[in-house]
Amino acid sequence: MLTYAELNRYADVLIWALKTARKTPFKKQDTILVQYDPAAIRIAEILYDRILDMEINPVQRMVHTVAMELNFYKKANDRQLIFQTPGDKELFGYLNGRIFLRAPDSLTHLKDVDPQKIGKVLVAKKQLRDIMDKREEAGHYSWTLCTLPTEELATQARMTPEAYKEQLIKACYLDLDDPVSKWRGILKEVTGIKNWLNRLSVKYFHVESSNVDLTITPGEKRKWVGVSGHNIPSFELFLSPDWRGTEGFYYANLPSFRSGNYVEGIRITFRKGKVVSLTSETGEDFAVKQLAMDRGACRVGEFSLTDRRFSRIDRFMADTLFDENHGGEYGNCHIALGSSYSTTYNGDSAILTKEMKKKMGFNDSALHWDIVNTEDKTITAHLTSGRKVVIYEGGIFKHPS
């Protein structure tokens, strides 16, 4: 659906993003994995060529087709569900970069699959994610991902394919001759906001909207990060809080598609850091089972805010990558149930052990589920000094000029 010129501009942005996400520069003879849905093969070919020009070794892998994935969950026995492909651990322990190109042909093909089966697969694959996390913490690895427009995405977002494509182009600034310059400019502006936030000594944040009354505790040695190259587009600023300090009520007014299921109108109650109640207007049984995936699935792993001045996304896109970066009239807040990001540790994340993360309240889970609220809201930082500072209101950060 994207033209060759648009795909090339997209590839420019993705290469910039992958480099920006690295703590250290790429070197010749490094290895970058390009994973892609079948419908993303054209941009995968462009990126493969670019990586070769960088004198870096590309490795390409196409992920499951819709039929493959559906048959897997229909027919795989318990041992097949947790089977790990020989060589995967070695490959992921060697990677220096990874680009994932999403172009889904279906968002609902797994709706009749037992969520516990899907959870079992995610738990089994977590060891690979742990390997990549440790490499990223050490500065040896970075990743980015993007979404390509498909008819399925347009249908589920209740848009025409052309309208969906135009929203995606606008969201990623692919309508500019040099989108990379725009992304560099956004990163520069956002860095000022991050520096201001990170200078505040915060005891807890209070999130208030018509349907949200939530307390988030940042915890020890946390920092706000964002526009880091992970995810295109990405305008959000976020941190991984101390999950133990989460209290109150949260509501996701944007729907989400997850593991082939559609979930809408999620309402959550937190007590002492854990979900004690979850209801949803649609997909409640699936959502409840997601929280039973492992011990950390019922805890918060991320707290995020998007400033509407940067994001041109102004409607539901049926894709979390875009929806968690919604700008619109009031920006958005989202939390993620499940795993946290050690990159929000305000120090050398390479020194973090599993025990240290646990002690500081970084959450560990095979789940990471972003759920989004776009209501007009106020976020107040309650400082350790006793002072209160409104950091976000009307969809923008209240960064002092």
Image: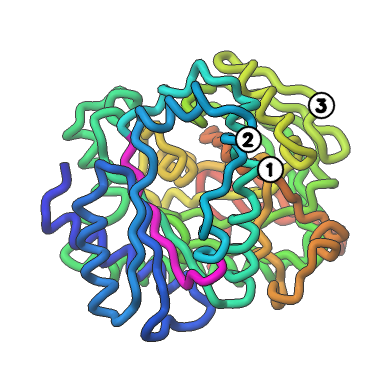
The residue carrying mark 1 is 338
Query: Of the residues tagged 3 and 2, which is closer to the observer?
Result: 2
Closest to the observer: 390 or 107?
107
Circle 2 Cα neighbour tier, 10 Å, few/some/many (<14 / 14–19 / ≥20): few
User: What number is the disc on residue 276?
Assistant: 3
Instruction: Give the magenta-colored segment's residue range.
Output: 93-104
Numbered disc 1: secondary structure: strand
Residue 282 located left or right of residue 217: left
x and y percent of residue 162 in the render? 17, 34
Query: What residue is shown at x 38% (from left), y 45% (from top)?
Result: 63
Numbered disc 3: secondary structure: strand
x and y percent of residue 252 in the render? 58, 29
Give the Cα distance between marks 3 and 1.
Answer: 15 Å
Q: Is the residue under label 1 in contact with that under label 2 (CB below 8 Å)? A: no
**What amino acid is labelled 1 in the image?**
Gly
Coloring scheme of the render? rainbow
Circle 1 Cα neighbour tier, 10 Å, few/some/many (<14 / 14–19 / ≥20): many
The residue carrying mark 2 is 79
Closest to the observer: 67 or 303?
67
